[in-house]
Image (tube, rainbow, N blue to C red):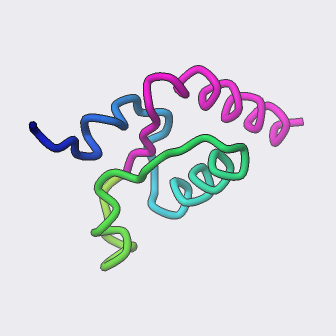
């Protein structure tokens, strides 16, 4: 039996950007009971000023809920 890694579970990208923005998105999702992970976040922790973009990933089942939540939050911020 092959063990499942994070890449097997969290496949859908809902955000890509700076490490600090990804942490905000992760907090938003988790506060709404949507499980997620940040991919490629180690460089953002070690050297945030040179870090490339990181991604927030969710499961396939939670993709629609996550994208709707992020979209509605962005619209609220623009009002």
Q: Is residue 47 above or below residue 68?
A: below
Residue 67 percent across, percent down from the top left? 60, 27
Q: Residue furthest right?
A: 79
Q: Is residue 30 left or right of residue 3?
A: right
Residue 31 percent across, percent down from the top left? 71, 52
Is 30 one of the magenta-colored residues? no
Residue 43 percent across, percent down from the top left? 28, 69
Choose top left, top right, bottom left or bottom right for residue 5: top left
Which corner quadrant holds the N terminus?
Answer: top left
Q: Is residue 37 left or right of residue 32?
A: left
* Residue at 41% over, 53% down: 38
Choose top left, top right, bottom left or bottom right for residue 66: top right
Q: Nearer the viewer, residue 22 or 35?
A: 35
Residue 75 percent across, percent down from the top left? 79, 31
Q: Residue furthest front?
A: 1
Is 66 one of the magenta-colored residues? yes
Q: Nearer the viewer, residue 63 or 24?
A: 63
Numbered marks: total: 0
Q: Is residue 57 left or right of residue 23?
A: left
* Residue at 53% over, 63% down: 20
Q: Is residue 78 above or below residue 28?
A: above
Q: Is residue 60 left or right of residue 62?
A: left
Q: Main secondary structure of the magenta part?
A: helix
Q: Is residue 48 above or below residue 78?
A: below
Which corner quadrant holds the C terminus?
Answer: top right
Q: Residue furthest left?
A: 1
* Residue at 34% over, 31% down: 11
In this picture, which residue range is highlighted in magenta? Answer: 54-79
């Amino acid at each position: 039996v092959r063990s499942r890694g994070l890449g097997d579970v969290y496949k859908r990208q809902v955000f890509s950007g700076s490490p600090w923005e990804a942490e905000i998105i992760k907090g938003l999702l988790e506060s709404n009971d949507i499980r997620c992970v940040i991919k490629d976040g180690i460089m953002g922790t070690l050297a945030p000023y040179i870090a490339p973009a990181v991604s927030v990933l969710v499961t396939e089942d939670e993709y629609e809920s996550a994208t709707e939540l992020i979209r509605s939050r962005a619209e609220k911020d623009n009002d």
